[in-house]
Amino acid sequence: MDEKGTMGQGRPLPAPLPDLENYVVDFDGDDDPSHPYNWPFTVKIYTGVLVCSGTFITSLASAIFAPGSDSASKEFGVGAEVGKLGTTLYVLGFASGPVIWAPASELYGRKLPLAIALLAGGIFTIGSAVAKDIQTLLICRFFAGMCGASQLTVVPGVLADIYDNTRRGIAISLYALTVFVGPFSAPFIGGFLATSYLGWRWTLYIPAIVSLFAGALSVVFLRETYAPVLLMTKAAEMRRQTNIWGIHAKQERMEVNLGEMAKKYFTRPLTMLLTEPIILLVSLYMSFIYGLVYALLEAYPYVFENVYGMKPGISGLPFIGLIVGILLALAFILLEHGSYAKKLIANKGVPVPEWRLVPPLIGAPVFTIGIFW
């Protein structure tokens, strides 16, 4: 359409569609097999395994460099504190990435951000591995962390797309397992690699290779799970089949407006954080726990190497105790989920947030006791 509001060649605009809503595609009821809720169980399982494995890889990559940071510092002639920034900047990348990946997953679906981030994260990690100076290593670590944030941001959305309220809690619990087991596995894996003939660079090569492999698998095998984007695909197919070009999905009406995106993904969450006491307290608590995880990654090896005389790699084995604790917590959550499911059925499928508070009410004091043990 040109500036005069015509179709070109002097043709006027055609008449508007009589009722735009009649041209909007939707799913064929609650039991539509194309809706992710109704996918075969095997498809849901392999989708969950695929996205959670990506989460494990990026979580592992966040801390696997830590055991080799001292060797890298010596090679580049900088202080040990500077070398440890390789882990710090990766985690800062985790914090920065959601600003990109959250809106991308709602505009373009889940598959594209996950696959791109795994491939890009692998490339940046290779950049860290081949770095000739500390600046390159640290910059690449930051951007690798920013890419890794895609797994932490988008994967819960994937699981929410394919599982209803009855099973979603189980799926999210298994996802949370990969978030924490990854960094707790890193000290002994990275420690043995850094002290072997392979050297500290292989603490970066290995996660890079695995990340690229997982990204390739996502490109080939991961199915799109975001319902609005699936409806866009359905609408495009119907347009081709019928030549009725007014057929569309509601998602296609969305316009990329930077102001609205900033309001939705930055201003609004920040406002909720500052004005909702529950959100503020839970966020502070989870931030403390997550920060403590990475503090332990530096403290444990130091204590067990310098106080107890353990060798690198061996000094990371005490983290197995933390992994066992996480597995026990997962078992408790899965056992408690049965009672949650019964309440959900009795309440006609309407969830009540407070029903989820039983595990945290028990876990919070146990966590505190564990710190002082």
Image (tube, rainbow, N blue to C red):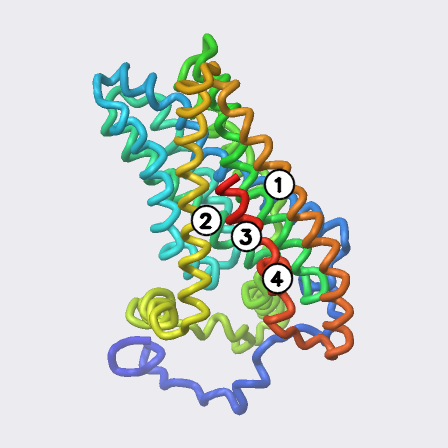
Of mark 4 and mark 1, the one earlier in the sequence is: 4
Which of labels 2 and 4 is toward the front?
A: 2
Q: Which mark is residue 325?
A: 1
| Mark 2: amino acid | Ile
Q: Residue at x 63, y 74 (%)?
A: 352
Of mark 2 and mark 4, the one earlier in the sequence is: 4
Q: Split into 4 quadrants, where in the image is the N terminus?
A: bottom left
Residue of label 2: 289
Q: Which mark is residue 161?
A: 4
Residue situated in front as seen by the camera: 161 or 134: 134
| Mark 3: amino acid | Val
> Can you see residue 240?
no
| Mark 1: amino acid | Gly
* Labels 3 and 1 touching (C-beta < 8 A): no
As helix, strand or loop, the secondary structure at mark 2 comes to: helix
As helix, strand or loop, the secondary structure at mark 3 comes to: helix
Classify 10 Å Cα crowding around label 2: few (below 14), some (14-19), many (20 and above): few
Which of labels 4 and 1 is toward the front?
A: 1
The CA distance from mark 2 to mark 3 is 20 Å
* Labels 1 and 2 touching (C-beta < 8 A): no
Classify 10 Å Cα crowding around label 1: few (below 14), some (14-19), many (20 and above): few
Classify 10 Å Cα crowding around label 3: few (below 14), some (14-19), many (20 and above): many
Of mark 1 and mark 2, the one earlier in the sequence is: 2
The CA distance from mark 4 to mark 3 is 10 Å
Which of labels 2 and 3 is toward the front?
A: 2
Residue 225 higher or lower than 198, as above or below: below
Residue situated in front as seen by the camera: 25 or 335: 335
Image location (x, y in percent) of residue 151? 50, 47
Residue of label 3: 155
The CA distance from mark 4 to mark 1 is 29 Å
Q: Which quadrant holds residue 269?
A: bottom left
Residue situated in front as seen by the camera: 317 or 227: 317
